[in-house]
Structure formats: structure tokens, C-alpha cells
Amino acid sequence: MRTFPARICEAFAREVRGAERGFTFIEVMVVITIVALVSAAVVLTLPGGEAKLRADAERFAGRVAAARDSAILESRPMSVWVSPSAYGFARRARGQWQPLEDKPFATTPWRDGVTADTQGQQIRITFDGTGMTDQPVAVTLYRDGLRRAVTVDADGKVVIGG
């Protein structure tokens, strides 16, 4: 047999549980606001077309600069070829251009819809043993109507432009 205080406590507990069966409007709005803020942060951090184009231009410029440095360190010519879909590297040996396939000089396709404007032909940038080029070259990369130019001046300096 239950005592009087135990029955009161049990009835009170049933009443309190019944009142807490749902969420209040404020609680629902707070959760929706938090989900919206997190979703917005995720969308804003996803790389867009400009970021992907810039990343490919920076990767290409870095590898071209590495080819120039390699030409200087080894005192022998290096070249970079560029096509609309990829780029690669070659080293002058025994009177011929020998393609390189070891990192960082492996043939690399443009990523994420990026293409190079080569006007239908392959562009070749050649560095002599001092790191200089025979002529300045500009390679323009395109993606979704955006463009980014990578230029190599006569001194071999590699610059990323707009």
C-alpha cells in the first residue's frame, strides 16, 4: 500500500511529464537558426569558380618556377609545354627534349573545368641554364567565364595576374 505522500509525488510527476511532451516555439526557432548558420558557413567555405581557377594558376606558376630553378641548379635547359587540357615538362639531354614524368614535373591535366588558351597549338616556355627565357610568355587560364593569366618574363620571373 502506498502512502499519501508517494501518491502525490506520482501524480505530480505524471502531470509534469505530460506538460513536457513537445518543444516550445522558441526552442524550435533556436534550432532552425543554428542549422541555418552552420549551413551558411559551409556554403561560404566551399571553393567557387574563382578559387578553383586561382588554385590551378598558383599550382601551375609554382611548377613553372620550379622548372626555372631546376634549369639554374643543373645548368641545363628546361621547358614547359602547355596545351588546352594539360601541361608538362622536358629537359634538354643529348640534343633532344626528354619528357619528365617524376614529381613535381609530371604531366598534369588542368583541374575542375580549367582550360588554357593556347590558340589551338602547344605553347612552349624554355628556360636556359641561367633561368632566362627566349621570349616573354603569357598563359591565360579560363573557367566559367573567369580568367587568370600566368606570365613568364624574359628574366624567367613567374607572375600570376588577373
Image: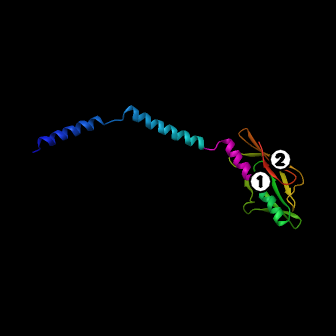
What range of the chain is rendered magenta?
A: 46-60
Q: Is residue 97 magenta?
A: no
Q: Nearer the viewer, mark 1 or mark 2?
A: 2
Dot 1 or dot 2: first in sequence order is 1
Between the residue at mark 1 and the residue at mark 2, the CA separation in whole angstroms equals 14 Å
Q: Amino acid at mark 2?
A: Ala
Q: How many marks?
A: 2
Rendering coords of residue 101 (x, y %) = 75, 62
Mark 1 Cα within 10 Å, few/some/many (few <14, many 20+)? many
Position of 14 compared to 35: left or right?
A: left
Position of 13 compared to 135: left or right?
A: left
Q: Is residue 98 visible?
A: no
Q: Amino acid at mark 1?
A: Tyr
C-beta proximity under 8 Å, tags 1 and 2: no
Q: Nearer the viewer, residue 95 or 9?
A: 9
Q: Is residue 56 magenta?
A: yes
Rendering coords of residue 15 (x, y %) = 23, 36
Residue at screen point 37% across, 33% down: 24
Query: Label 2 belongs to which residue?
Result: 138
Rendering coords of residue 110 (x, y %) = 72, 50
Query: Label 1 belongs to which residue?
Result: 87
Indicate whether 25 appears above or below 53: above
Residue 18: numbered disc: none
Indicate whether 17 appears above or below 138: above
Residue furthest left in the image: 1
- Quarter holding the N terminus? top left
Q: Could you say which quadrant of the image residue 63 lies in?
A: bottom right
